[in-house]
Image: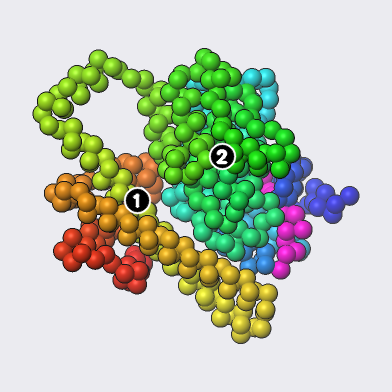
Amino acid sequence: MDIQDDLIGKTVHDSYNIVSKIGEGGMGRVYLAEHARVTERRYAVKVLKRELTQNPKFMNQFFEEARHQAQLSHPNVVQMTDYFKEGEDYFLVLDYVEGHSLAEMIDSSHGPLPQKQALQIFKGILGALNSAHEKAILHRDIKASNVMIDGSGRALLTDFGIARQAGDEQAASLGRVIGTPEYMSPEQFIDSDKIDHRSDVYSAGILLFEMLSGRLPFEGSQDKLKEQHLGVSVPNPRSINPKLKKCLGEIVVKATQKPPDARFQGSLAFLKAIERCERGARWPLIVLSLSILLATGTWYWMQNEKAIRSLVTLSIDNYGLLCLEAEALKRKELGLRGAKLLGESGYTEAFSKSIEGHKANMNKFFEQYSNALDELSKYRVSMVHEVLKASPHKEEMGSRTADAETQAKRERFRELTSKDFEDRRSTGKGPSQETMLQKCPG
């Protein structure tokens, strides 16, 4: 018997009475617990496997990663309320969800979920993912068993246990489990250290396929799954469930394209596509609107405005990611100095590797920002000015539930992008990485 089974009936951290074991996964065991003083409060307490926690690099990363998870506050995310180490064990404490997993729901249906129900659940999942991606946090293990459905039918995304702050190579290397092969993106099979939020988009597309068809697109051994995810197109779910709307099948196909650039470029774009599909096309009104636009010469403006807004959003995102990486780099450089002073060679090596990764990511985000400015300079200046000065669209601000601080930071990055565009237009040169970092919001 594993010593962790002895937790049942005990109180940990002077706060959580362990009632029973409710599950086990790749990261550890999950227990139902009640608060020691407020027994009405129930929690899911995850005890991480000791094979992971005995890794000498793990302690350095655990609390930082737990803080990242604690950043996630969204109606469709299972909230983490506490994290601590007691004895030899590491604990994560999450709100307990009364309900069942999406995997159980799919299994019990013995086939596809009703389209309306599936989309209602899935839109909640995309909202949760968008909230995480806005904070540069990847999930890395989107699958049906990591989605809980509560009594009201609401979806809650859980188990960010192998999620890593985007671009943190050291963090990615600490987890032995890097995902679930049935749902993993092609790039996650190739190099799990180098994936971005579009990998989660792919995995979410696989999950939507499963919900709408009642089965996974690929099955077999890990090697067979890798071969299929890398080289075989995900079929249109309408080939299994012909009752689906045509646009919905096309959405699944787009979300699961092999090249990341060919997919939806974020969870919000994925969500918007589903909402458009649900509304349906009102062709007489669309034809009339196009006729008016073409007659008044507005069509050219609308097409170019869309492209400019996309470039502005790309610029804002990359400026923000550059600043986030710079903050993380400072922390790791501080840790490296401490490790060297203490003579801890293992930590020194881990911090050094992490620092290299942050620098590489900073160069990548800077290059993408510079390229976006170059592309903006190809459009009519008056059009770019109008888009930059206008109130940002919801797509540019992120989710509707973004907090005021997040929105204020994005607006600051928007102002910085506008200034850099002006400088690029007048001097022919964009900003240096050093100049950009000096202006990062505190």
The answer to whether residue 402 is visible is: yes
The region drawn magenta spans: 39-56
Disc with the residue nearer the chain's start (2 vs 1): 2
Taking the magenta stretch, the answer to whether it contains residue 54 is yes
363 over 402 or under it: above or below: below
x 27%, y 43%: residue: 307
Q: Amino acid at mark 2?
A: Ser
Task: Provide residue 237's location: percent of width, then percent of height.
Answer: 55, 24
The residue wearing badge 1 is: 314
- Helix, strand or loop at label 2? It is helix
- Helix, strand or loop at label 1? It is helix
Answer with left or right where residue 25 lies relative to residue 289: right
The answer to whether residue 99 is visible is: no
User: Which color scheme is applied?
Assistant: rainbow
- Foreground residue, 408 or 177? 177
Answer with left or right where residue 25 lies relative to residue 157: right
| Image-quadrant location for residue 100 | top right
